[in-house]
Image (tube, rainbow, N blue to C red):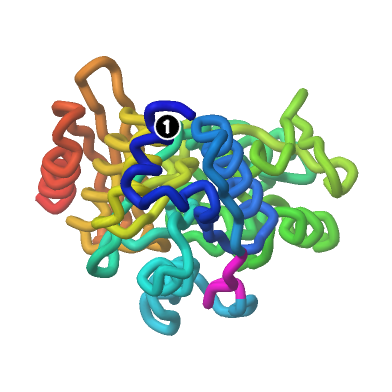
Amino acid sequence: MTGWEGRIWHMVGTDMPNRNIIIATRGSALALAQANHVFDECRHLFPRLRFEIKIIKTTGDRIQSASLAQAGKSLPKGLFTKELEVALLRNQADLVVHSLKDVPTELPGGLSIGAVLKRADARDVLVYKDHAGNKGALPQLASGGLVATSSPRRLEQLRSARPDLQAQEIRGNVVTRLEKLAENNEMDATVLAAAGLDRLNFTIKDDFLFGDAVPEGIRAEMLEPEVMLPCAGQAAIGIEVRTEDERIGSICSRLNHFNSHQAVGAERALLAAMGGGCSSPLGTLATVEGELMTLQAVSFLGNEVQKAVAKGDVREPEALGEELACQLRA
């Protein structure tokens, strides 16, 4: 038994090896891939402790046709988190695995983000059918091309580069969206998160997308931050816990990746200060070099596009996020 396992065991008594530590997650393919990654990390770090995965269906899983763009008006906050948090508060789960981009900036009392795993590629990917050969920005898309996305952030940034582009909402998991793109003759492209594609074992090679159930001829290209900033927390796996649970806190301290935790902390602080949510038209990305953090953002929350960059101490992410929010509101 490792020193860390002994410490955790001591916290809960000698029955610890007989008690499963429950990792709660949504049931989508991507959510399960992330939960299994956390499960594997836990088993690697604590081989004598017992973990199990528990699937919980959320409101967001039940709603398939509603517009995420109207989430602030017609749908409740925490679409993909509420039921998971209830399980935590009722001691029906010990850790909840989230795509951190889906987690509201204000958590229920008694809960907190205990760990952020090392962040994956935070970029978005343009997934398209034909290379139109246009000159200028986004040459993959024909003039007046139709892009399927339910994200105001993605749409506004695409239209900043290409005002001629048209939009259509789209819902469903990655495979469903790829099928809709291939089957709809009027649809030219969609935008997906690079991290999600990678976690589902999709790859990009020679501008084509490869993986299980990828329709023939589907192309893909990374969108650099200069073209498309991600949403706050994109590509980061967050673990939500009961704040006062020292046993689980000790586990999270081993799972946490400091730079990733601080970076998404700054992004989420910015989002909170701007009064936005996970579906807000605001892109942001924090990067860390040594003790210096750089936070950049683009906001479409007002009447005009606002862009700003701020730098600060990696140990003070909330202050950096609030500073950048002040710049954007100025």
| Residue at 33%, 51% in the rendered image | 113
Whole-percent x, y for residue 85 in the image = 40, 68
Return the residue nearer the eye: 91 or 130: 91
Q: Nearer the viewer, residue 187 or 4?
A: 4
The one of 320 and 14 positioned closer to us in this rendering: 14
Q: Quadrant of residue 317?
A: top left
Above or below: residue 16 compared with residue 150:
above
Give the vertical position of 88 relative to 95 (above or below).
below
Judged from this view, the residue extending furthest toward the bottom is: 74
The residue at the point 44 percent across, 43 percent down is: 230
Q: Residue 268, percent across and down?
A: 28, 50
Q: Residue at x 85, y 61 (%)?
A: 183
The number of numbered discs placed on residues in the rendered structure image is 1
The type of residue carrying mark 1 is: Glu
The residue at which mark 1 appears reads as: 226
Give coordinates of residue 145: x percent, y percent: 66, 53
Magenta range:
55-61
Q: Is residue 231 left or right of residue 320?
A: right
